[in-house]
Amino acid sequence: VGKGVEVELVDKTRRRGFVYTVDPISHNTVMLTKPEGGAGEAGNWGASMLFNGAVKSVADAPIVEIDFASMEQDHPLTRRDRVPAEEHDPAKVAERLESVKDRLSAHRVSFTVQEGTIVILDGVARLPAPYSKHDIVCQNPVVLERMRRTIFHD
């Protein structure tokens, strides 16, 4: 994940880009690709889904560095833009932090708090402020959904 690769597909086409995520069950891959002749800035990249059976080979490819975190921050639908300002009130954020810690402890889920981010199961999942179910970051969709249900009673 986050590595520049060149992928050859079974139909003999080639794709160059960055591996954004890999589904742990199906092994399908989401790859960020730059359009032909694109400048390479974050806004010019697109996403491609590569199905596991369609991939013939994968090789390292030197590609310009991109910063996934800045792409998320610059995206027009970032979490902070969708959340009402009152949800970011420091008192409410502190209250939600304590509530999440209580729920994790009650369910005996191991966690630590590092610089305001709750690190769950030794880094398998993270929950940064403002500590809502949409803020959980986890590569494994099964663990992500289970954490959402455990913490937020879904």
Image (cartoon, helix red, strand yellow):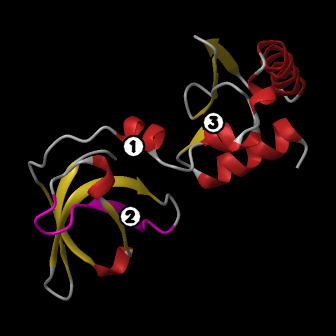
What's the residue type where badge 2 is placed?
Answer: Thr
Picture residue at 88% right of the left edge, 22% below the top: 99
Position of residue 51 measured from the top left corner of the image (x, y, whole percent): 38, 76
Magenta segment: 26-38
**Residue 68 placement: quadrant:** top left
Name the residue beneath numbered marker 1.
71
In the image, which is nearer the foreground, mark 2 or mark 1? 1
Picture residue at 87% right of the left edge, 27% below the top: 103
Which one is nearer the viewer's eye here, 29 or 78? 78
Query: Compared with residue 76, is residue 94 higher up or lower down, i.e. above or below?
Result: above
**Residue 89 placement: quadrant:** top right
What's the residue type where badge 1 is placed?
Answer: Met
Whether 36 is among the magenta residues is: yes
Position of residue 1 measured from the top left corner of the image (x, y, whole percent): 34, 47
Name the residue beneath numbered marker 3.
80
What's the residue type where badge 3 is placed?
Answer: Arg
Query: Compared with residue 5, is residue 52 higher up or lower down, i.e. above or below?
Result: below
* Disc 2 secondary structure class: strand
Tell me if 38 is positioned left or right of 71 in this view. Answer: left
Name the residue beneath numbered marker 2.
29
